[in-house]
Image (spheres, grey):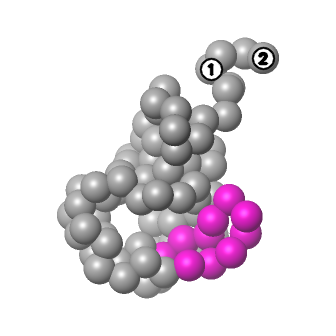
Amino acid sequence: MNPTSKPGGLDQPFRFGAPVVPDDDTDLPQNSTLYIGTEGDICGITMGGTEVTLRNHPVGYVLGVFARVKATGTTAEDIVALW
């Protein structure tokens, strides 16, 4: 397996990161855990396809893997996708 494409988990250090621009229709470039830089609500689609909203999430890591962060319902800012 190519080490740059190794799927990471919550117990693995991230190898790549990208700023997140929440979008109702576009997936993240890779299923990712998220880092939230400014607290708020996060509405997204999980890796498993379920839509969830995490209310008042504090600054820090989100313990989950997301395929998409939606603009509608997301008030958190400075979000980074990590994989």
Three-letter residue code for mark 1 = Thr
Q: Residues within 10 Å of mark 2 (few under 14, many from 20)?
A: few
Residue 3 sits in which quadrant? top right
| Residue occupying the point 43% across, 78% down | 54
Give the number of the disc on residue 4.
1
Can you say whether 3 is above or below 59 in the image?
above
| Residue occupying the point 73% across, 64% down | 48
- Magenta stretch: residue 75 in it? no
How far across and how far down the image is residue 39, in percent? 23, 69
Give the overall secondary structure of the magenta segment: strand
Can you say whether 25 is above or below 6 in the image?
below
Task: Specify start and end residues of the magenta stretch as a single range.
Answer: 43-52
Left or right of 49 on screen, residue 28: left
Q: Is residue 75 visible?
A: no
| Residue occupying the point 68% across, 26% down | 5
Asked which secondary structure carries label 1, the reply is helix
Left or right of 56 on screen, residue 67: right
Three-letter residue code for mark 2 = Met
Asked which secondary structure carries label 2, the reply is loop
Give the number of the disc on residue 1.
2
How far across and how far down the image is residue 25, in percent? 63, 70
In the displayed image of the protein, which residue is found farthest to the top? 2
> How far apart, in angstroms, are the residues tagged by discs 1 and 2?
9 Å
Looking at the rendered image, the quarter that the N terminus falls into is top right
Left or right of 8 on screen, residue 16: left
Check contact, mark 1 vs mark 2: CB within 8 A: no
Front residue (pair 71, 7): 7
